[in-house]
Image (cartoon, helix red, strand yellow):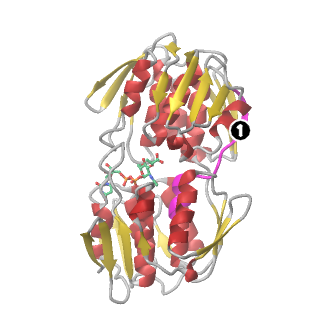
Amino acid sequence: MDKLIITGGVRLDGEIRVSGAKNSALPILAATLLSDTPVTVCNLPHLHDITTMFELFGCMGIDLLVDEKMNVEVHASTIKHLRAPYELVKTMRASILVLGPILARHGRAEVSLPGGCAIGSRPVDLHIRGLQQMGADVIVEDGYIKAVVNGRLKGTKISMDTVTVTGTENILMAATLAEGETIIENAAREPEVVDLAECLITMGAKISGHGTGTIRIQGVKKLKGCSYTVLPDRIEAGTYLIATAATQGRIRLKDVQPDIMDAILVKLREAGATIEWGKDWIELNMHGQKPKAVDLKTAPFPAMPTDIQAQFTALNAIAEGTGHVTETIFENRFMHIQEMKRMGADVTIEGNTVIVRGVNKLKAAPVMATDLRASASLVIAGLVADGNTEIERIYHIDRGYECIEEKLRQLGANIQRIAG
Ligand code: EPZ
């Protein structure tokens, strides 16, 4: 397995481009299954999860045309199998996103139940319940979700017990082809949900209220092909801003959307960063100062994203003062803490809060990535540690960060990938 070796102590300084958002690309690729005619999706990030989705489509017999820029043309009318197998779903939970579209378009679908993952049990009960409320018969048998509906799904009012991003996305996609109106209450408001809705509208869907807690969908008989460009990745952008703040450096991000990053930008200003931005760029400058520790609590959008808490913990580890980081979305998203302790971080877990007392320096150590965002926090810790930090199991990083070592080298970091 590949590993990364980072020699810490370099102040990041430079300019990089932000890639398309993984968590927007995945539901939008699933949405292409709703259309009879080809859909082209542009600005896809070069990530393992995206190629896993391509493999899943291949498994279902769907023809794809992928160009050298990772734009893809999906011919969903060529689909031959309505089944998403365990072998693929176990490697990427987001495969569950094909359930709603395939059921709505073809009247039946079989998707392997995604297992839990490192950060939590990750149930999909709300996905299933929503489809059942729309008239589908759904059973879980032999580790598979088996859904069938006679004729079309029926629009109805669905109130989500918990705000769920992919749960909202699955029901939203299914509702576009249902008979009548569907109202999703307590819907997720994430920008990636809005991006999916905008793509569906481009395909002819009738949707309003996306980005608020109540989404209304008027079902239509068919959706048509289109070309759609995925929005920039706010979590990737936030990760590089935090890494630059931790190293007391300076960065300019291009092809980014500042207006969906308020919670992250406000917190970085609290940490002492000077931040300027325009329509599609952000500049952060620490003026060579150490960051100040910050307190944060994760919650659904527009609050602090859970996908950025580990990165802020790494910032707090070498900041002035003590920061409190509270995780409210997932039950086990502190796996990076033990690894950071091995690097000399002064961190204590109390319930769902980590208390981080800033230390002057972290020390390089061999550490292990456990999930996508935890591994990003270990990269940040390696950038500020004394010595060479070795990070194992970096396939986790490759799932969510396009060309991470190239982008960090562009910013002056001393980082190597060792093929293993
Ligand atoms: C999405 O996961 C993202 N993944 C995650 O990003 C992100 O961390 C998460 O939303 C929260 O923002 C994609 O978009 C592909 P949820 P998702 O359903 O949809 C509970 C990354 O790092 N829940 O919003 O799976 C669940 O247990 C990944 O890129 C139910 O109880 O998360 C959790 O406590 C990690 N029943 C809460 O809702 C359900 O049926 C929020 O989870 C569904 C969810």
Image quadrant of residue 390?
top right
Asked if residue 236 lies left or right of residue 350, the reply is right
Instruction: Give the residue displayed 40% in from the left and 70% down from the top.
Output: 99
The tally of labels here is: 1
Which residue does the image show at 51% across and 54% down from the upper left?
Answer: 23
- Name the foreground residue: 317 vs 209: 317
Magenta residue span? 13-28
> Is 211 left, or right, of 335 in this rendering?
right
Q: Position of residue 106 (x, y in %)?
A: 43, 83
Asked which quadrant contains residue 144, the reply is: bottom left
On screen, residue 308 above or below 37? above
Residue 283 coordinates in the image, percent (x, y): 68, 33
Residue 176 lies, in percent from the top left, at 46, 77
Please say if 333 is above or below 71: above
Is residue 18 highlighted in magenta?
yes
Q: Is residue 367 above or below residue 230?
A: above
Circle 1 packing at 10 Å, graded few (<14), some (14-19), many (20+), is some
Residue at x-position 41% and y-position 56%: 93
Q: Which residue is mark 1?
A: 16
SS class, disc 1? strand
Which of 58/220 is in front? 58
Badge 1 amino acid: Ile
Tell me which corner region of the image, top left, top right, bottom left or bottom right, holds residue 173.
bottom left
Q: Quadrant of the C terminus?
A: top right
Q: At 32% across and 76% down in the image, what residue appears?
A: 147
